[in-house]
Image: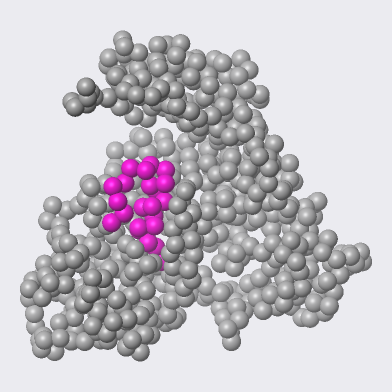
């Protein structure tokens, strides 16, 4: 793959980086963690100069030094430099400093319209052109799956109530190691028990918390993963640690996590959650990952752990222990063994969710300057833009300013039939419609002075086709799952890059005219599908941006005839395309996929 996608730096097996702080100020060193092939972790320190892209329009230019006048007094100080960038972009100065304190002092002199600052967590990787987890597979990453069970003296557990203790903490690792910590005050200290070798008994909650933190440190995972870990497990553990005067020191440097409240926008919903930053590790929440998947599919029966694994994925173990949440406290009193089995089953099922929903973000982090946690929570536009910033930074080229928002034509959508259809339907989808149009129409944002947009889109599209071909041909279920996850990662970036960022008021290389070319030509393709389906006896029920639901003709009564109908639509559409349906050279067929077959049945109660 091109350096545009994976960066120029070939360093492998970086699992985490952290800016080193001194006296509360992020300094000029980055702490880098590498997991060796034998599973050991080594760390080293590397220099980092935090930076911003500033505009020389902020003040009058000192033409001799080519520096904005506002920087003259700052560049007199050691460690602060201003480098004039090539090109015609609005942000034409690269301002670097020895630490973020210096950089903050500079930005306080500036109106926010005169500079852009790539996120702190990505700056080291942007400078290096490096990415995380190169040369690793998903299985090479060491993950701790964590879950806690808490006492509830009221209707719900309350971490600030002294009585609502954590009485079970369960750990499962990606290497298959189990450990369950249980609070049983009445059990004689250090006495043997029959709960299993993986169970460690504690007589008080403080000792259990210390044991939990020590266990995580000894395992030294790259990722701590839980189901609703952001809003329940981590906050609860933090509060109980504070109650007992114990440091929640699960970071690789022994520090407690830092956290902040934030919101993730998922379609029409805003999801509030707490984002946890553990030094040298990534924190992943499988509940949030499931919600992100459901934005597209909208078919999940719920977001609870058991519902997702048992009812949605159908991957629950036959001997899985089930206990209703409101019965756990009472069951712990009468049958501790069943609760301990239940707790261990919880973390094992969390692994199932992470393997299913989290792998795509692992492979995204191999491409982008963001770590696993940030790839899973940041918007896809931010992720795609980082590809551009990385290349423009390497080439020492100025960055453009975003265009003001304006309206553009959208995709074509509509409902063509209301009521009971009365015959079988299929959904026909144009595979990768917008990426195909972006390539065929040779879309190129006018502000992309390095002309990298098309190479990026073409590389991603070519790579995705290769991965899909391998996935379809392999018989190995593990390889098929891995290839599917890589395909999902590429799809996230490709779909956003082929249209979304062009129409976004926040993307610095946005281009509303080019975005409109994609949508208007997309409308023409979809309308040609409507024409084709009707021509061959189908009845269009509803249409969205890149596909449509079609009631099959009465004479289509077998799977072979369904495929034949879909192919006739595809050939007809491509004949129209090749004869000038839309502007530009079309050098490949638009592939129309038969995504699903829907058999409509009569309602027995209908009159």
Q: Position of residue 151 (x, y in %)?
A: 21, 76
Q: What residue is shown at x 78% (from left), y 58% (from top)?
A: 92
In the picture, measured across the screen, residue 184 lies left or right of residue 118, that is: left
Q: What residue is shown at x 31% (from left), y 78% (from top)?
A: 159
Residue that lies at the very extreme toward the right in this rendered image: 64
Q: What residue is shown at x 42% (from left), y 20% (from top)?
A: 540
Q: Position of residue 146 (x, y in %)?
A: 30, 68
| 356, above or below 565, in the image | below
> Would you say residue 292 sits in the magenta stretch?
yes
Q: Nearer the viewer, residue 60 or 136?
A: 60
| 463, above or below 18, in the image | above
Q: Position of residue 180 (x, y in %)?
A: 21, 73
Q: What residue is shown at x 35% (from left), y 80% (from top)?
A: 239
Residue range (magenta) = 283-304
Point out the image quarter for the C terminus. Answer: top left
Q: Position of residue 296 (x, y in %)?
A: 42, 43
């Amino acid at each position: 793959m091109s350096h545009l996608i994976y960066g120029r730096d070939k360093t492998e097996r970086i699992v985490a980086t952290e800016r080193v702080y001194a006296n509360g100020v992020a300094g000029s060193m980055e702490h880098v963690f590498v997991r060796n092939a034998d599973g050991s972790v080594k760390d080293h320190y590397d220099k980092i100069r935090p930076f911003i892209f500033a505009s020389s329009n902020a003040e009058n230019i000192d033409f001799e030094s080519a520096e904005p006048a506002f920087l003259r007094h700052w560049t007199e100080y050691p460690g602060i430099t201003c480098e004039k960038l090539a090109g015609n972009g609005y942000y034409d100065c690269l301002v670097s400093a020895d630490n973020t304190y210096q950089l903050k002092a500079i930005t306080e002199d500036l109106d926010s319209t005169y500079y852009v600052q790539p996120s702190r967590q990505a700056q080291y990787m942007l400078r290096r052109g490096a990415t995380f987890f190169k040369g690793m597979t998903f299985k090479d990453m060491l993950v701790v799956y964590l879950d806690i069970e808490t006492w509830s003296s009221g209707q719900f557990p309350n971490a600030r109530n002294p009585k609502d203790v954590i009485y079970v903490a369960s750990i499962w690792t990606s290497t298959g190691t189990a450990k369950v910590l249980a609070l049983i005050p009445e059990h004689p200290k250090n006495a043997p028990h029959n709960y299993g070798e993986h169970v460690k008994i504690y007589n008080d909650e403080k000792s259990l918390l210390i044991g939990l933190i020590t266990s995580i440190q000894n395992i030294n995972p790259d990722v701590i993963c839980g189901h609703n870990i952001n809003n329940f497990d981590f906050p609860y553990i933090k509060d109980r640690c504070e109650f007992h005067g114990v440091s929640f020191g699960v970071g690789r440097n022994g520090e407690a996590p830092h956290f902040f409240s934030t919101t993730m926008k998922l379609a029409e919903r805003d999801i509030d959650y707490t984002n946890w930053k553990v030094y040298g590790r990534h924190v992943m929440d499988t509940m949030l990952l499931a919600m992100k998947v459901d934005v597209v599919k909208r078919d999940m029966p719920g977001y609870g752990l058991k519902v997702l694994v048992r009812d949605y994925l159908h991957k629950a173990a036959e001997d899985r222990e089930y206990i209703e949440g409101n019965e756990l406290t009472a069951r712990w009193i009468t049958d501790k063994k069943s609760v301990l089995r239940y707790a261990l089953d919880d973390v094992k099922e969390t692994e199932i969710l992470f393997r299913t929903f989290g792998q795509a973000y692992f492979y995204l982090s191999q491409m982008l300057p963001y770590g696993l946690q940030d790839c899973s929570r940041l918007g896809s536009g931010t992720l795609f833009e980082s590809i551009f910033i990385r290349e423009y930074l390497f080439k020492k080229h100025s960055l453009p300013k975003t265009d003001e928002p304006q309206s553009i034509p959208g995709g074509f959508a509509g409902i063509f039939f209301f009521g009971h259809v009365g015959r079988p339907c299929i959904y026909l989808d144009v595979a990768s419609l917008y990426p195909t149009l972006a390539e065929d129409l040779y879309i190129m944002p006018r502000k992309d002075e390095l002309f990298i947009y098309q190479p990026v889109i073409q590389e991603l599209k070519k790579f995705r086709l290769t991965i899909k071909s391998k996935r379809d041909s392999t018989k190995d279920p593990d390889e098929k799952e891995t290839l599917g996850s890589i395909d999902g990662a590429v799809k996230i970036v490709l779909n956003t890059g082929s249209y979304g960022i062009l129409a976004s008021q926040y993307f610095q290389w946005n281009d509303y005219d080019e975005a409109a070319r994609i949508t208007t030509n997309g409308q023409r393709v979809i309308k040609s599908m409507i024409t084709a389906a009707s021509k061959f006896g189908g009845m269009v029920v509803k249409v969205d941006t890149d596909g449509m639901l079609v009631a099959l003709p009465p004479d289509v009564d077998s799977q072979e005839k369904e495929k034949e109908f879909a192919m006739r639509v595809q050939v007809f559409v491509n004949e129209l395309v090749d004869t000038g349906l839309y502007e530009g050279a079309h050098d490949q067929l638009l592939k129309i996929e038969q995504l699903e077959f829907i058999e409509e049945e009569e309602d027995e109660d209908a009159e």
